[in-house]
Structure formats: structure tokens, C-alpha cells
Amino acid sequence: MTHIPEIPSNATPQEILKAGVEAANGQVSLACSFSVEDVVIIDMAKEIGLPIGVFALDTGRLNEETYEVADAIVERYHTVIDWYFPKHEAVEKLLKEKGQFSFRESLENRHECCHIRKVEPLGRALKGLAGWITGLRSEQSVTRTGLAPIELDKSNGGILKINPLLEWTEAQVWEYAEARRLPTNRLHKEGYPSIGCAPCTRPVAPGEHPRAGRWWWENPEHKECGLHRR
């Protein structure tokens, strides 16, 4: 069984990253949605010389601005991004039977769409990995409390799941990004703290919760796509 290292409460994200990669003892990759958190993690890993991979899930409904960040990352870090796509047969069947916006009709339909476009491709992306890295932060959502900086991901074959920014605030993330002049998604500055598929993401009003713009027609406790099952 993979050993989960003890992480001090005052550990830095860089220390968590290093401990997680060492404990995984194999290939580790970042699941990158090109959020500011993910770009921060890429920069940290490069700075401390961690040999991690980067993969992305192209759902077919990403914003143009998201692809711009992907290109900027490749140019700045000379890294390779491994793209994974949903199976076209499943997408075609879904759209033919239920239309373009079935995900807004029920939670079941939304989970079906997320499974086809995200969860199934993630399974392929994680195949053969010893661990994966996420940009999850505890303050993002009620569904993300109680996580650990490094944990065993039983939903994905028992590999390590590394959450180096778990205890960082949004302000800390942006302080790092701005100090390092990192490439970030233009939508963040337009009121999008959380960015997913274009039809499922909208800007939030001042004072609204950062995740209020994701699947805004659902209750907060349902606002996950299935990538982070617990």
C-alpha cells in the first residue's frame, strides 16, 4: 500500500508537492483546468525542479480564454500538455437523444454530461499514474472541506492525490501569481473566480461565493462534476 506522508500543519505548498511526489514513487501529473491555482502549481513545480506531467480534459465546451492560457503555459515553461477528450460516440448519442442543454434539466442529466465529458476521460488520463495533483482549496466549496493535503484516492485505484494549495486563500494564490507575473485566464478579471465549461459557468456578483457561478441552478452541496469523488 502507498504510504501517505505526515504533513505538518505549517507546511508550504512546495513542501506538500515535494512530499507527495516522493511518496508516490512513480509518475505524477497535474490535472490542469488552467485556473490560476493550476498555473501557480506548475510554476512552483518548475521552480523546485519536480518532474511532474500536465494533462488537461477538453470537454468540447471550454472558453477560448482557457486555450489562451494553455498556449501561454507551453510557451513559458516549454512543457507538454497531454490532452484527453470525451469519446465522440458518447457525446453524439447524448446530444442526439437529449439535446444541447440536457444538463440544466436535472441533477441526473448534469452528472451524465459531466461523466461523459470529464469523468471518463479522467480515468484514461490517470491510468498508469502513481499520483495526481489538483488545485483544490478548502474555501472554494462546502464539498471541499475535510480534504487532506495528501490522500489516498480510492475512487481512482488507490493512487495518491496531492492538494498542495488546500489551505491557501484566494488572496494568497493571487499574491503569488501576480508576484511571479504568471499567465492567467482573462475571465478571472471579468468576475469568474471558477471557470469550467462555458455553458455551466457565469460571472459572480460582488459578495457572492466564488463557486456561485458554477452550475448556478443547483444547490451548493451538489456542485461537483464527479472528478473529485469521495
Image: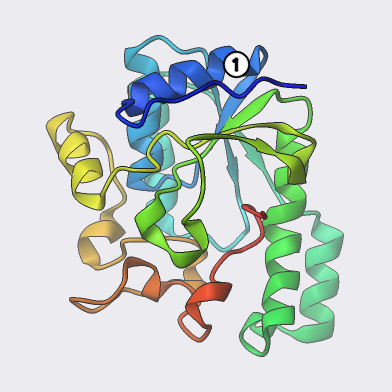
Q: 113 left or right of 210?
A: right
Q: Nearer the viewer, residue 123 or 88?
A: 123
* Residue 208 figure quarter: bottom left
Seen in the picture, residue 68 relative to 98 is either above or below; the reply is above
Q: 188 left or right of 15?
A: left
Q: Residues within 10 Å of mark 1 (few under 14, many from 20)?
A: some
Q: Position of residue 116 (x, y in %)?
A: 76, 61
Quick one: quadrant of the N terminus? Answer: top right
* Residue 77 figure quarter: top left
Q: Farthest residue in the bottom direction?
A: 105
Q: Nearer the viewer, residue 49 or 201?
A: 49
What residue lies at 39% left-to-right and 48% top-to-bottom? 35
Seen in the picture, residue 88 relative to 3 is either above or below; the reply is below
Q: Nearer the viewer, residue 56 or 1?
A: 1
* Residue 209 figure quarter: bottom left
Q: Position of residue 32 (x, y in %)?
A: 50, 40
Quick one: quadrant of the C terminus? Answer: bottom right
Does the image show residue 53?
yes
Does the image show residue 72?
no
Q: 69 left or right of 172?
A: right
Seen in the picture, residue 68 relative to 158 is either above or below; the reply is below
Q: Could you tell me which secondary element the residue under label 1 belongs to?
A: helix
